[in-house]
Amino acid sequence: MVFRTGPLQVSTETAKMAQSLLYPDSPVAMKLDDGCSQLFTVQGRIVSLSAIRQVQTKDGAVPIRDLRICTTEGTEIPICLWREEALGDFAINASISISHLRLSKSPSFGTKASSTQFTETKEISIGPKTTTITINGIATGQEVVFSTCTGGELKASQEILAALAPAEGLEIFDVLPLTVTVVVKGDSIIEVVN
């Protein structure tokens, strides 16, 4: 039987509560765990980003994009975004949250997180964090840009560059690659710890 009724008035709070029950938030993961059997969220800074490529499936061509996220704990998580999520506007060093990912294993690409039909991507604000980076290149000019071994770039001031200067008689370029502990906020180094 089908019952018909007049229009129902549902408050915004009730609608949000119903949506959270039907589509609950996924827990934040700081590393890929082989035992993870549920959907999870990854939050952090994009350190590498591939171009969009097309893969043929039984449904036709599907866009795919790979990226790596560095979490607030310094762990890098590889992620493969499929379909609409792959078409998003992403940039290196952007802080993002990608929800409702699942663990995927393959002999050809290893273990990585993959998007699902419930995946949502949004930019977030992450406060300063202390991390260890390996600098393998430096570009100087109005601002200093450090290239890291993970393929990311971090901006810094001339004062930060001076704080990294090696012993007298050496140029900083002579000691590359250089591993240092720094405080990073967004895409900028704001302090050298050691």
Image (cartoon, rainbow, N blue to C red):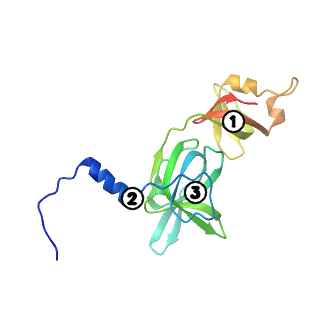
Pointers 3 and 1 in contact (C-beta within 8 Å): no
Residue at horizontal 86 percent and vertical 26 percent from the top: 167
What is the number of the mark on residue 146? 1
What is the number of the mark on residue 52? none
Residue at horizontal 23 percent and vertical 49 percent from the top: 11
Foreground mark, 2 or 1? 2
The kind of residue tagged 2 is Tyr
Q: Is residue 38 above or below residue 49?
A: below
Q: Position of residue 155 (x, y in %)?
A: 63, 32
Q: Residue furthest left?
A: 6
Foreground mark, 3 or 1? 3
Q: Position of residue 1 (x, y in %)?
A: 17, 77
Place residue 127 in its image quadrant.
top right
Q: Is residue 154 above or below residue 114?
A: above
**For marks 3 and 2 on the same chain, the one whose residue lies earlier in the sequence:** 2
Q: Position of residue 61 (x, y in %)?
A: 48, 68
- Structural distance between the alpha carbons of marks 3 and 1: 24 Å
Residue at horizontal 32 percent and vertical 53 percent from the top: 17
The local secondary structure at tag 3 comes to: strand
Residue underneath mark 2: 23
Q: Is residue 170 left or right of residue 162?
A: right
Residue at horizontal 49 percent and vertical 41 percent from the top: 124
The local secondary structure at tag 1 comes to: strand
Place residue 129 in its image quadrant.
top right
- Structural distance between the alpha carbons of marks 3 and 2: 21 Å
* Label 3 packing within 10 angstroms: few (<14), some (14-19), many (20+): many
| Residue 48 appears in the figure | no
| Residue 94 appears in the figure | yes
Pointers 2 and 1 in contact (C-beta within 8 Å): no
Residue underneath mark 3: 79
Q: Residue furthest bottom?
A: 1
Quadrant of the rendering where the C terminus is positioned = top right
